[in-house]
Image (spheres, rainbow, N blue to C red):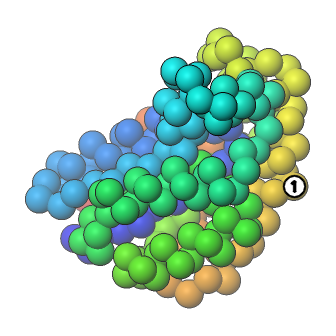
Amino acid sequence: MKATTVIFIGPQGSGKGTQIELLDKVLTEKDPLRRIVDIQTGRRFRAMTAKRETYAERKVSRTLDTGQLQPDFLTHLLWGQAMLEQLDPKSHLLVDGFPRTVAQAEVLEEALDFFERDNVHIINLDTPEDVVRARMKGRARDDDTDESIETRLKWYREDTLPVLDYYRVRPDTQVHDLDGTDTIEGVHSQILKALELND
């Protein structure tokens, strides 16, 4: 199996984290000798704010609760450090939480080139706003207030959807538009078919 980069794009509540975990298990079974690097920026931001000891930890904690995008330099630091510590050209790479803007995608290009990643798949979990709105309200997370949910949906529409257009014209990249309203098992099946892992 060839080393693969899979970038998950979709609004919050579309199930990206769940699907990364399921895909990780499949890749582990099918390619047990290859390292799988799983970088989920949202999870890393929440871990960063757990202690709230430094100014940065306290400030990010406050802004996480509002649903607004974090500064690019922080996002780049988090995923960049994870790549430096874990990634090499032979690893599988699973990504959620970046790039969230075209500017972040352009910075990620440098990392993909540095780590010799030339087999890139974009999993677009196309999920209507009313569906993800209901999912986020139902998962009872502290930062899923009505205001923060609407803020996230707005920046997803304005800042993240253009990232899909960026990747549709990128060489050596396949964008897979999947139905995010399907069941967890159904979306997982769509992903395996898109990545040709369902044999």
Q: Which residue is mark 1?
A: 158
Q: Residue furthest front?
A: 54
On the rendered structure, is 145 left or right of 73? right
Residue 184 seen in this snapshot? no
Q: Secondary structure at mark 1?
A: helix
The relative height of residue 38 versus residue 17 in the rendered view (above or below) is below
Residue name at image x 24 percent, y 71 percent: 90
Question: Toward which corner of the image does residue 170 lie, by quadrant?
Answer: bottom right
**102 lies left or right of 25:** right
Residue 151 makes an appearance in the image: yes
Asked if 35 appears above or below 2 in the picture, the reply is above
Residue 126 at what x, y percent from top left?
68, 50
Q: Residue furthest bottom?
A: 171
Q: Is residue 12 left or right of residue 88?
A: right
**Other-residue count near label 1 (Cα within 10 Å), few / some / many at <14 / 14–19 / ≥20:** few
Q: In the image, is residue 150 above or below residue 6?
A: above
Q: At which x and y percent is residue 17?
A: 50, 38
Q: What residue is at 56 percent from the left and 23 percent from the top?
A: 53
Given residues 30 and 111, the one toward you in this image is 111
Percent across and percent down for residue 46 are 56, 30
Determine the image quadrant of residue 171. Answer: bottom right
Image position, residue 167 (x, y; %):
64, 74
Residue shown at 79%/48% (left/top)? 156
- If the image is split into quadrants, where does the N terminus sit? bottom left
Amino acid type, mark 1:
Glu
Q: Quadrant of residue 9?
A: bottom right
Quadrant position of the C terminus in the picture: bottom left
